[in-house]
Amino acid sequence: MQSGGSGGFGGGPGGVAELPGVRALSGQGRDVVVRQDGVASVAQLVGWGVSSAAVRRKVAAGHWRRAFRGVVVLQSGPTSWRQRARAALLYCGPDAALSHESAAFHHGILTEPGRSVVVTVPHTRTVMPQLGLVVHRSRTMPWAGGRLRSVEPAEAILGIVTTTTSAHSRGAESTARAGAVRRDLTDALVGLLCDAVRAGVHPDDLLLRAARRTRMSGRRLLVEMLGQVAEGVESPLEHRYARDVERRHRLPRAVAQRWERVDGRWIRADRVYVGFAVRAELDGRLAHPFGATDDDVWRDNATLLATGDTTLRYRWRHVAVTPCATAAQVARALRDRGWPGRPHPCTATCAITT
């Protein structure tokens, strides 16, 4: 797994070592600060012979930047995410570890780090709140390690699941919003779990770790969503298609993520209705300025010529906003090609009529 991006001057040891503030330190102090990405606590600096008054002058003059109380970055320019994460760990003290979104970003699961650095500390420790820092306390600290101390990827994902489900539960206190809140939550969790699995987190590892937790908000939903991922769901759109288009209208279940060789190329179909010459392709982009891409058109044509299958292509709006109309269209294609069943309306206002 790749560590999340850093940016700024503190992107690597070579750049940090050339910072004027770092070069001015003694040998031991310089080596430590280089390992710490150009970040140091005031206590460390005092131990290396830099007075706290000198630190204040450097910060006031703009030569150094204050990250958190008692922690500075020994440079004047913009700080990188890695430097802010390092500063958070120094501020929170020994045994603190990046967790939740910050750990997931560090491990390459999330592409954005979020606005705050998220850290978990032992439950016995009290950390004063700071802007740009979120601190969780844990009675049982998970294992953490690495040059930028972090919990393992699976623990990061479970942490996000717990905090996300708790936040959505508070948002669903109004029964009028409960359904919408749950849909938003499942979309968020499916997307997170798909990203985690693609990054190398094994679903069984998540399930085992979740089972070992005595209390965990969202455990049941996590198990349900991991089952969807195991069946081939790779995005929130695919989850909604299986749930809102197929299951709620009693359509046959399609085979997910089927690889085939067509016209000399390997292609992967999102959904194939085996035996009925129908397949569905799901595009999660909200819009594309020119409709289907050239590759999409080629694939649809090649599939039609090679297999005779009809390809139905749907986007987010078709599945999330008009799932009943989409189900009716899929059902018509299936019945035209020999499906003996009938779709069922999901509600009294469903586009499917009996």
Image (cartoon, grey):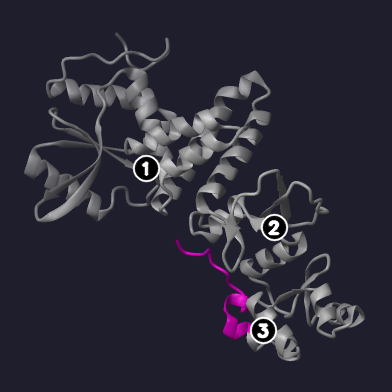
Q: Which residues are magenta?
A: 1-16
Q: Look at the image and tell me in which quarter the C terminus lies.
A: top left
Query: Residue 234 shows which numbered tag?
Result: 1
Between residues 19 and 244, which one lies in front from this camera angle?
Answer: 19
290 lies above or below 254: below
Q: Look at the image and tell me in which quarter the N terminus lies.
A: bottom left
The answer to whether residue 17 shows anywhere in this view is yes
49 lies above or below 110: below
Q: Nearer the viewer, mark 1 or mark 3?
A: 3
SS class, disc 1: loop
The answer to whether residue 315 shows anywhere in this view is no
SS class, disc 2: loop
Report crowding for label 3: few under 14, some 14 to 19, many 20 or more residues within 10 A (C-alpha).
some
Query: Residue 128 shows which numbered tag?
Result: none
**Is 2 inside the magenta-drawn segment?**
yes
Write the residue at 51% across / 57% down.
Answer: 111
Mark with earlier residue (2, 3): 3
State the separation of the CA atoms marked 1 and 2: 33 Å
Residue wearing tag 3: 31
Write the residue at 73% across / 57% down.
Answer: 132
Residue 281 pos. (x, y %): 27, 40
State the separation of the CA atoms marked 2 and 3: 22 Å
Task: Specify the quadrant of the image occupied by residue 90.
Answer: bottom right
Q: Disc 1, disc 3: CB below 8 Å?
A: no
Q: Give, as a three-letter code, the residue at label 1.
A: Glu
Mark with earlier residue (1, 3): 3
